[in-house]
Amino acid sequence: MKVVVTGGGTSAPIDDVRVITNVSTGRTAAAITEACLGLGDEVWHIHAPLAELPLLRFARCDLNADPQTERDRLDDLRRRWLAERDRLHLLPLKVGTVAEYSQALRAALSDGAIDVAFLPMAVSDYEPEARAGKISSKIDDLSIPLRRTPKVIRSVRDWAPSVYLVGFKLLSGVPTEELIQRAHDACLLNRADLTVANDLKDVQAGRHTLHLVRPGQPTETLSPGPDLAARLVERVRTWAREASLG
């Protein structure tokens, strides 16, 4: 399959040196891309400047590890990189604004016949009117007016009508029923085939759980585990194939 994945968090500049951003690391997106590559897919991976990158995130040497064990790990990683790098297209955002993200996503979806789009990138809901220069640090109380940003995911169906669209809904500390309902509502608003719902509190507690919400279908829940992203990708591939067959 041909797949687009987006990862990390967008940034909203306040002035020339400061931005408003979020806690997204891009780890989930990187794991999704790695799972897709492992299944033979070609992936366009759009990422924020500081997001974790698929495969490359494991390239740092662990100086506390046994030297031979670490050498073997890096050799295995290099073999996988050489085998899969031609199917991985890394598309970094320069600043990471919502507008830049929208432009990059539209280009990726328009340039090829993309089968599936995973959009876990944490996109800013609000942004200020950026000011030239640097706001003085001598100000005791600084007010920064924010305006709502466009919902990029709501344009995807216009850019790529046949793509299997996977959105993500992250909340924090809410009941599971509310999380699932919000994901269902997001599916309808975004014209998405699937919304993956999760809770930040679960992620931080090491019990990352995914609820797969599709309009008119029973919700499926994926339990925590190191292969969580791979299980998500397997389910999406199945549903995407079924959708393509009508």
Image (cartoon, helix red, strand yellow):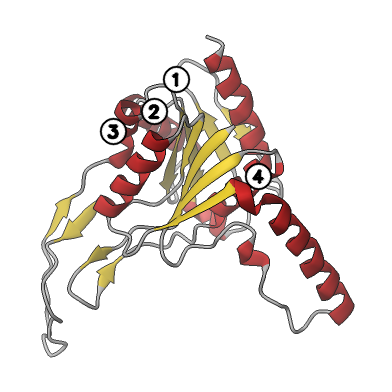
- The residue located at (62%, 36%) in the rendering is 233
Q: Residues within 10 Å of mark 4 (few under 14, many from 20)?
A: many
Q: Which mark is residue 155?
A: 3
Q: Residues within 10 Å of mark 3 (few under 14, many from 20)?
A: some
Instruction: Say which amino acid is labelled 4.
Output: Leu
The image position of residue 102, as x and y in percent, is 30, 46
- The residue located at (83%, 74%) in the rendering is 71
Instruction: Say which amino acid is labelled 2.
Output: Cys
The answer to whether marks 1 and 3 mark residues whose Cβ atoms lie closer than 8 Å is no
Q: For mark 3, give the secondary structure.
A: helix
The image position of residue 211, as x and y in percent, is 55, 35
Marks 3/4: CA–CA distance:
26 Å
Of the two numbered discs 2 and 4 on the same chain, state the one appearing first in sequence. Answer: 4
Instruction: Say which amino acid is labelled 1.
Output: Pro
Q: Residue furthest top?
A: 246
Q: Residues within 10 Å of mark 2 (few under 14, many from 20)?
A: many
Instruction: Say which amino acid is labelled 3.
Output: Ser
The image position of residue 18, as x and y in percent, is 25, 75
Direction from residue 79 to residue 4 in the image, left or right: left
- The residue located at (55%, 25%) in the rendering is 219
Of the two numbered discs 3 and 4 on the same chain, state the one appearing first in sequence. Answer: 4
Q: Which mark is residue 187?
A: 2
Residue at which label 1 appears: 215
Direction from residue 33 to residue 132 in the image, left or right: left
Of the two numbered discs 2 and 1 on the same chain, state the one appearing first in sequence. Answer: 2
Q: For mark 4, give the secondary structure.
A: helix
Q: Which of labels 1 and 4 is toward the front?
A: 4
The image position of residue 76, as x and y in percent, is 80, 62
Quadrant housing residue 204:
bottom right
